[in-house]
């Protein structure tokens, strides 16, 4: 039995490791020329050095992290290639609605056994990006997060897809702690800078917008599947963390299990509408600059609240460009010659003053 399961979209946190200082005096320094060339491969016109800031990120590495997952080195090599040209986003922002920067160069960085992907990103020094750059330079933004999809979360204990075995990441089996190895990376979606205390790494089903029947099914399983029991049929779709998350959410929001399915449907519908509206406004406002496919994948793993924040930014811009019209406007009266009015008045008078016919 080797059934193919849906790929995952995953977020994984990293750190900002530095910025490349630049002064006019540094212009002659080794590497500056190569740096400008590397950046200009992605720019539409040659950029001058003072027009952009450069940051280095440590996006992901080969060690088991606190979520009990790790990348094997060959996947890091792939990510190292795939990240080039991908956007750097600012997450959890209320106003920003466009990517902030572009990954233009990347290398594998080694320190002892630790291998990490260290890409560099350039951010244009535009007025719009000034606060973002300042927040990084000032150390307020120091965490990063990479969004990517991969096909196989391999169990470190038994080697199977961890969704189809009974091992639980973080639990000890004899003296081995179970973790999963992220194999077959398909796509790097974006790298993000996040303000401190990011939402962390977690699984997000690639296609969260399930059709209602399926959403119902998943909800029922989430409610009915006991955490530690993985019958083969159920474990194909549900991993223990999801069940725990669903239960915790129901508890937090005082949702009764019988209402969970309806709420999931409502949530899916609300997300779908918000994303459609966002993309509609994006196309109107930014035309060819609106990278719909990147946005769809990005929004797909944000919460409804985060989607609304992004949507709000577009709505503000849209309202500025096309100010809303008052609902009721004075209706223009038909233009009439004052003469006509007086004539009509006279006619009326004549009519009423005429003696009734005999
Ligand atoms: Zn296993």
Image (cartoon, rainbow, N blue to C red):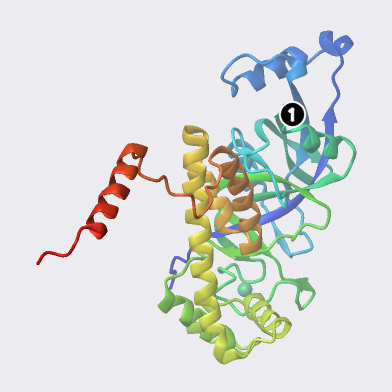
Rendering coords of residue 30 (x, y %): 81, 13
Rendering coords of residue 222 (x, y %): 57, 83
Rendering coords of residue 337 (x, y %): 34, 37
Q: Which quadrant would residue 200 be assigned to in this image?
A: bottom right
Q: Nearer the viewer, residue 244 or 265?
A: 265
Q: Nearer the viewer, residue 334 or 3?
A: 334
Residue at x 73%, y 12% (from the top left corner): 33
Is residue 112 something one can see in this rendering? yes
Question: What is the number of callouts on the image?
Answer: 1
Q: Is residue 226 left or right of residue 53?
A: left
The quarter of the image holding the N terminus is bottom left
| Residue pointed to by mark 1 | 127
The quarter of the image holding the C terminus is bottom left
Q: Is residue 321 left or right of residue 178?
A: left
Q: Which quadrant would residue 43 be assigned to in this image?
A: top right
Rendering coords of residue 319 (x, y %): 58, 44
Vertical placement of 317 versus 217: above or below?
Answer: above
Residue at x 25%, y 52% (from the top left corner): 350
Vertical placement of 61 versus 124: above or below?
Answer: below
Q: Nearer the viewer, residue 158 or 90?
A: 90
Instruction: Tell me if mark 1 has few (under 14), some (14-19) or many (20+) residues whose alpha carbon lies within 10 angstroms of its own.
Output: few
Is residue 74 something one can see in this rendering? no
Q: Nearer the viewer, residue 13 or 128?
A: 128
Residue at x 48%, y 69% (from the top left corner): 269
Quarter of the render that holds ligand 1: bottom right
Numbered disc 1: secondary structure: loop
């Amino acid at each position: 039995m080797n059934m193919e399961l849906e790929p995952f979209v995953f977020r994984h946190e990293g750190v900002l490791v530095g910025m490349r200082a630049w002064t006019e005096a540094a212009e002659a320094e080794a590497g500056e020329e190569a740096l400008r060339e590397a950046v200009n491969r992605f720019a539409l016109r040659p950029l001058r050095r003072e027009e952009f800031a450069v940051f280095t990120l440590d996006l992901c590495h080969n060690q088991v992290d606190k979520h009990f997952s790790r990348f094997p080195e060959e996947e890091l090599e792939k990510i190292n290639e795939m990240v080039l040209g991908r956007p750097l986003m600012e997450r959890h922002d209320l106003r920003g609605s466009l990517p902030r920067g572009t990954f233009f160069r990347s290398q594998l960085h080694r320190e002892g056994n630790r291998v990490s992907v260290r890409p560099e990103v350039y951010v244009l020094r535009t007025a719009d990006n000034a606060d973002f750059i300042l927040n990084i330079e000032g150390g307020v933004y120091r965490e990063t997060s990479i969004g990517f999809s991969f096909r196989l979360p391999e169990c470190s204990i038994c080697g199977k897809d961890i969704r189809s075995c009974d091992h639980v990441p973080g639990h000890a089996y004899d003296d081995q702690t179970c973790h999963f190895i992220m194999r077959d990376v398909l796509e790097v979606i974006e790298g993000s800078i996040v303000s401190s205390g990011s939402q962390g790494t977690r699984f997000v089903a690639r296609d969260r917008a399930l059709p209602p029947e399926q959403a119902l099914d998943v909800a029922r399983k989430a409610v009915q599947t006991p955490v530690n029991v993985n019958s083969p049929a159920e474990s194909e779709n549900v991993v223990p963390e999801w069940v725990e998350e669903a239960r915790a959410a129901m508890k937090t929001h005082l949702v009764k299990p019988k209402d969970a399915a309806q709420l999931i449907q409502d949530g899916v519908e609300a997300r779908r509408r918000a994303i459609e509206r966002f993309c509609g406004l994006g196309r109107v406002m930014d035309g060819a600059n609106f990278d719909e496919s990147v946005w769809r994948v990005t929004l797909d793993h944000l919460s409804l609240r985060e989607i609304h924040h992004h949507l709000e930014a577009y709505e503000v811009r849209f309202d500025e460009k096309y100010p809303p019209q008052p609902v009721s406007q004075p209706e223009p009266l038909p233009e009439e010659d004052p003469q006509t009015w007086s004539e009509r008045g006279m006619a009326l008078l004549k009519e009423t003053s005429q003696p009734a016919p005999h």
